[in-house]
Amino acid sequence: MKQTDTQLIYGLRPVMEAVKSGKGIDKIFVQSNLQGKLYLELKNMIAQSEETISVQYVPAEKLDRLTGKQNHQGVAAQLSLIEYHDIEQIITQTKQKGEALFLLMLDSITDVRNLGAIARSAECAGVHALILPRQATAPVNQDAVRTSAGALLRLPVCRIDNPKTFLNLLKSYSITTYVASEKAQEDYTSMKAEEDLMIIMGNEEKGVNPQIVKQADRLVKIPVKGSIESLNVSVAAGIMMYEVVRQREKGL
């Protein structure tokens, strides 16, 4: 199987073998308008896979850039560097230990450096799991792992396909969800850290998806006193997480 140092494999048969073997695949890149018997076979394998695999159709030029102009046959796949965890299992195990659950969800965080920096802070803060939607999320690649100082290899990471379904699941477990938002009326220190909770951080430009905001239990904000309107998302996430740490250590 051909593989580069960025965990990318290419060629129809190598990618088919990866899908068949159940290897963690972050994304498959397919050349636009690709045809042929082998590709149709791969397409069927993806559709029948137990794992939901993200497929992105791209021009040949992008595949050339990704593979260094190797013979990619119109297909390349980005392999996962980490093993993803089952969120319900983490919830159950944490509750069995008698610990207050502490989750962090990232919505549309597409910069790998922000992802890595947030994961590093999350591991230090004792977050039980990092939740990443499968779509519109930065890849967990070597740059992300490096920026996280290895935290992404230690911190349980969970993939979700449907945020709406996931948030409904949390409600069934009585887990309070807090969205960090500049539009909130409440201060972030109003979070009740003694409860099972999840913090949701969004894209720096657009914030958290409105549908997710609608489903969340509470919105909280970090006060900004200067002329710049917002903090970097990794900094804001660190402030939110360490407020939970502060309250729990003081028994608030």
Image (cartoon, helix red, strand yellow):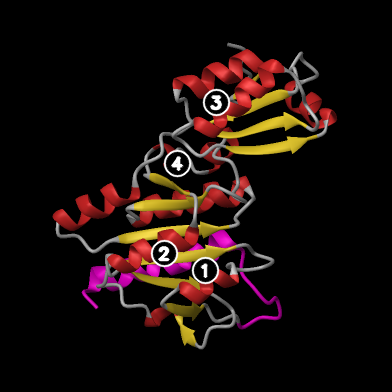
In the rendered image, which residue does mark 4 sit on? Answer: 152
Residue 80 visible within the image: no
Q: Amino acid at mark 2?
A: Leu
Furthest-top residue in view? 1
Q: Earlier in the sequence, mark 4 or mark 1?
A: 4
Residue depicted at x 54% and y 39%: 140
Q: Earlier in the sequence, mark 4 or mark 2?
A: 4
Q: Position of residue 160 (x, y in %)?
A: 46, 50
- Rendering quarter of residue 217: bottom left
Q: Nearer the viewer, residue 90 or 59?
A: 59
Return the mark for residue 63: none
Return the mark for residue 212: 1
* Label 1 environment density (alpha carbons within 10 Å; few <14, some 14–19, many ≥20): some
Q: Earlier in the sequence, mark 3 or mark 2?
A: 3
Q: Position of residue 250 (x, y in %)?
A: 24, 73
Q: Is residue 84 above or below residue 171?
A: above
Instruction: Check disc 2 and report its element: helix, strand or loop.
Output: helix
Q: Earlier in the sequence, mark 2 or mark 1?
A: 2
- The region drawn magenta spans 225-252
Q: Nearer the viewer, mark 4 or mark 1?
A: 1
In the rendered image, which residue does mark 2 sit on? Answer: 167
In the rendered image, which residue does mark 3 sit on? Answer: 45
